[in-house]
Amino acid sequence: MRMLRVLAFVLAAFALISPARADYPDKTKTIRIVVPYTPGGFNDTLGRIVAQKFTEDWGVTTVVENRPGGGTLIGTDAVAKAPADGYTLLVVAFPFAVNPTLYAKLPYDTVKDFAPLILAGQTPNLLVVNNDVPVKSVKELIDTAKAKPGSISYGSTGSGSSNHLSMELFRLMTGTSLIHVPYKGSAPMVTDLLGGHVQVAFDNVPNVVTQVKAGKLRALAITSPERAPSLPDIPTVAEAGVPGYDVGVWFGLVAPAATPPDVLAILNAELNKILAMPDVKQKFADQGVDPVGGPPERFAEHLKVQIEKWTKVVKESGAKVE
């Protein structure tokens, strides 16, 4: 009887400490997934896949809120200051690990203000040029950029994006000079690239692979250390003339830092379940993204490594906000 009384006391205490946890997710509430980018890129696609599955699996209304601008700072800061109850999540990508160094001061702390949920997927960037540009290889691009410094403009999805830092690393390793033209998202950047307003860009495979396969853009190289099985004829940047070049693009989700651990565990389990679904795997594959998944600790370690790597590149290249 004594043991039963102790057990009852422990269970009652636990219920008092976390009464809302057992009810998560509450079907009367709405889960908000903030995407700090314009619609059209894979960041947005990821948010909408997760929102759809949350709604289907949990019966909880889940909405995607696109909050672009400020190099992702606007949407990111909004989530940092949101209630830490599991009902506001943030889609994060490459800039999340770059911004702490790129900006002299952030309105939030990248490490302290967020709880990693899951590393959702990874993909390389493609180095692409407008078809009217008389450059058909990485070597020709380097030679042209060196012969006429500042004559070639490159687009990006904003300062600190993988597009921006991919080119900054390229410039650093090749001694070239190109003009940076930042956009608020991949869709407007690709539109201007197709129109010839900028000549070249690194962009996530999902954002440009359709145009490449349709012959509307010319792919010079891929940023991964090995060729992509889906694009076997496109060389890596390293084998095309820049030995050691390697950039991986990634996508994930985080929550406000004070979100209860048991809520984070529920979210992580559901997100891993979603990434394992055949239809989700196919949607990722269609856009050249490999699902990853795993525990929050894996994503936390990934972020640590990424922050360390790009801190060095930003400082050595002199990359800045434009």
Image: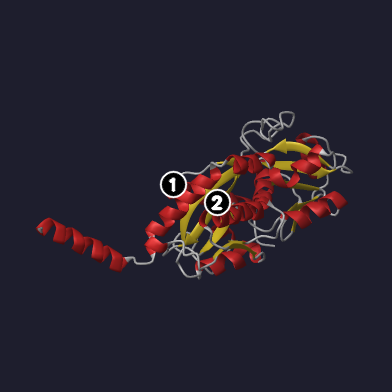
* Residue at 85% over, 42% down: 216
Q: Please report whichever mark, 2 or 1, sits nearer to the chain's N-terminal start.
A: 2
In-image side of 170 versus 10 (left or right): right
Pointer 2 residue: 252
Disc 2 residue type?
Gly
Q: Which secondary structure lies at badge 2?
A: strand
Pointer 1 residue: 295
Position of the N terminus by quadrant: bottom left
Cβ atoms under marks 2 and 1 closer than 8 Å: no
The residue lying toward the viewer, choosing from 69 and 3, is 3
User: Residue 230 location in percent, x, y?
Assistant: 69, 32
In-image side of 266 versus 289 (left or right): left
Disc 2 crowd, CA 10 A, few/some/many (<14, 14-19, 20+):
many
* Residue at 77% over, 42% down: 210
Indicate whether 301 appears above or below 58.
above
User: Residue 145 location in percent, x, y?
Assistant: 79, 44
Q: Which secondary structure lies at badge 1?
A: loop
**Distance of label 2 from label 1 (alpha carbons):** 12 Å
Position of the C terminus by quadrant: bottom right
The residue lying toward the viewer, choosing from 174 and 90, is 90
Count all numbered tags in the image, as a single digit: 2
